[in-house]
Image (cartoon, rainbow, N blue to C red):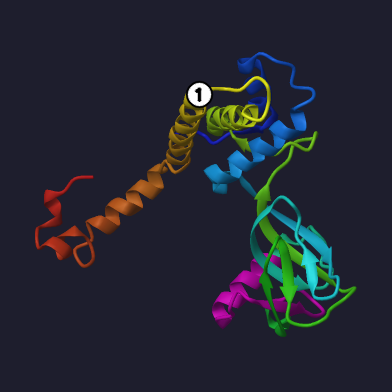
Amino acid sequence: MAINKLISVKQAIFEASEDMGFDITRDKPTFSMWAVRAEKDIGSYYSYKRQRAVLTITGCCAQLPSSAAFLKTVVMGDMGCECGELFQNLYIWAGASNISSNETFLVIDNPNISDYCLGGVTWSTQDNAILFSQNLDGQKVTIEYLGLEEDCDGFVMVNENHIPAIIEYIMWKFCIRSRFSNLKMELGDIKMHQAEYFRLASDSRAMDATLTDSERNEIVAMLHDPYSGWGLSVGVSPSNYIL
């Protein structure tokens, strides 16, 4: 199986400028914005990194980091960012206690499962922020989330196989922008880059979702299960099917 290697999205920005043959200096912020937008459109689940942050609540709201994509857990208080074991124990405790995902946890004293109790605070997310059901102004909250990783220059890291699609997205948006300038690109060029972006984006998603050997073996086992596999649904022996 191919390895999903993360590289800086600035690689796509530089390649796009080279392909179009002009100096990127003035347009680097715009190209960066387009590149991040393309990456989010392609879908970055396999590029996301598990991260933690301590946020300060303002009124009923705590602003999430700009890199956050999926919010996993909210814990009241400042637990620090190096609290992986704490969150892992919380997941185990919440699963065993059938706790819903829109409730926060209050951690008291020692980080042992027996010390966890439900804080009674509910929350939801809106406009890249956590909205609480009551005014908690000035309090701290620790979160664990999946988000895009950044390089030392602040550029997001993306799967290497996303680069061709991101380049095409930049070209597509550049062609659209040119329609408002004196050097207008043809509509045919816009449609060509649009179609090529959608093709490469679909290819990138497919490459991201390539199964590992263990995942493939699990699917084979499920499909050939005599109680729930193909044999039960179609009335034919599952031994007639080979995946």
Q: Is residue 107 magenta?
A: yes
Residue ID at (57%, 22%): 185
**Circle 1 sits on which residue?**
189
Quarter of the picture containing the N terminus is top left
Residue ID at (80%, 35%): 152
Quarter of the picture containing the C terminus is top left
Task: Kindly identify the amino acid type of the residue bearing the numbered disc 1.
Answer: Asp
Would you place residue 152 above or below residue 182 in this image?
Answer: below
Position of 228 compared to 165: left or right? Answer: left
Residue ID at (58%, 78%): 100
Task: Tell me where the magenta segment starts and ends, as one range.
Answer: 86-112
Residue ID at (39%, 49%): 215
Q: Position of residue 34 (x, y in %)?
A: 65, 37
Q: Is residue 153 magenta?
A: no
Q: Nearer the viewer, residue 60 or 215?
A: 60
Q: Position of residue 6 (x, y in %)?
A: 62, 35
Specify few, some or many for label 1: CA neighbours under 10 Å numbering under 14, 14-19, or 20 or more: some
Q: Nearer the viewer, residue 49 or 108?
A: 49
Helix, strand or loop at disc 1? helix
Which residue is at the far front? 182
Position of 199 compared to 66: left or right? Answer: left
Q: Quadrant of residue 89?
A: bottom right
Would you place residue 144 above or below residue 183 in this image?
Answer: below
Q: Nearer the viewer, residue 222 or 37?
A: 37
Q: Quadrant of residue 222?
A: bottom left
Which residue is at the far top? 21
Position of 87 compared to 110: left or right? Answer: left
